[in-house]
Image (tube, rainbow, N blue to C red):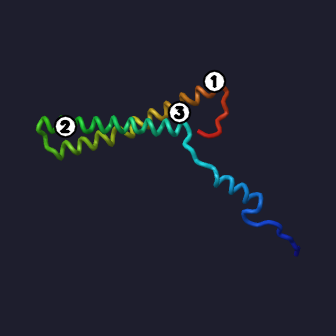
Amino acid sequence: SCTAVVVRTGDNTFIGKIAQLTVGTDNDDTPIAKEIHHFILIVSGVAMFLGITFFLIGVGLGTDIIDNLVFMIGIIVANVPEGLLATVTVCLSLTAKSMATQMVLVKNM
């Protein structure tokens, strides 16, 4: 058995002060997160443009509206994931190669 004297508890301890510091910081987007978000908007815009264009061409040719709608949704859904994954992977690998040649230590991407 032993006896102890508690001096500080909760937020008054050293760990509590660290927790307060981490809560007080802002979570700003990293530069690569901003670039990826911008790229997602571009890829999505291009996919929407292509889908709507093919929908209008189909309507102009006189095909069924439901078939055109399904084709438009298929184009939009197929373009976004396919283009996004490949481009983000290439972007990350080129960035990593560039930073490696400059001997950069990355803390947070």
Which residue is rendered at x = 64% and y = 35% of the image?
106
Q: Quadrant of the N terminus?
A: bottom right
Which residue is rendered at x = 64% and y = 55% of the image?
23
Q: Position of residue 71 (x, y in %)?
A: 23, 41
- Asked where in the image residue 97 lies, by quadrant, the reply is top right
Secondary structure, mark 3, is helix
13 vs 49, left or right, is right
- Asked whether 79 or 106 is in front, the reply is 106
- Asked where in the image residue 48 lies, by quadrant, the reply is top left
Secondary structure, mark 2, is helix
Q: Position of residue 30 (x, y in %)?
A: 56, 40
**Classed neighbour count for the residue bearing mark 1: other residues with Cα under 10 Å, few (<14), some (14–19), many (≥20):** few
Q: Which mark is residue 92?
A: 3
Identify which amino acid the numbered label 3 is placed on.
Leu
Q: Choose mark 3 or mark 2, whichever is in front.
A: 2
Residue pointed to by mark 1: 101
Check contact, mark 3 vs mark 1: CB within 8 A. Answer: no
87 vs 105, left or right, is left
Residue pointed to by mark 2: 56
Q: Along the polypeptide, which appears first: circle 1 or circle 2?
A: 2
State the count of labels: 3
Which residue occupies the extreme top position in the image? 101
Identify which amino acid the numbered label 2 is placed on.
Leu
66 vs 41, left or right, is left
Which residue occupies the extreme bottom position in the image? 1
Identify which amino acid the numbered label 1 is placed on.
Thr
Q: Position of residue 42 (x, y in %)?
A: 39, 35
What is the C-alpha distance between the residues marked 3 and 1?
14 Å
Q: Along the polypeptide, which appears first: circle 3 or circle 1?
A: 3
49 vs 60, left or right, is right
Q: Quadrant of the C terminus?
A: top right
**Classed neighbour count for the residue bearing mark 2: other residues with Cα under 10 Å, few (<14), some (14–19), many (≥20):** some
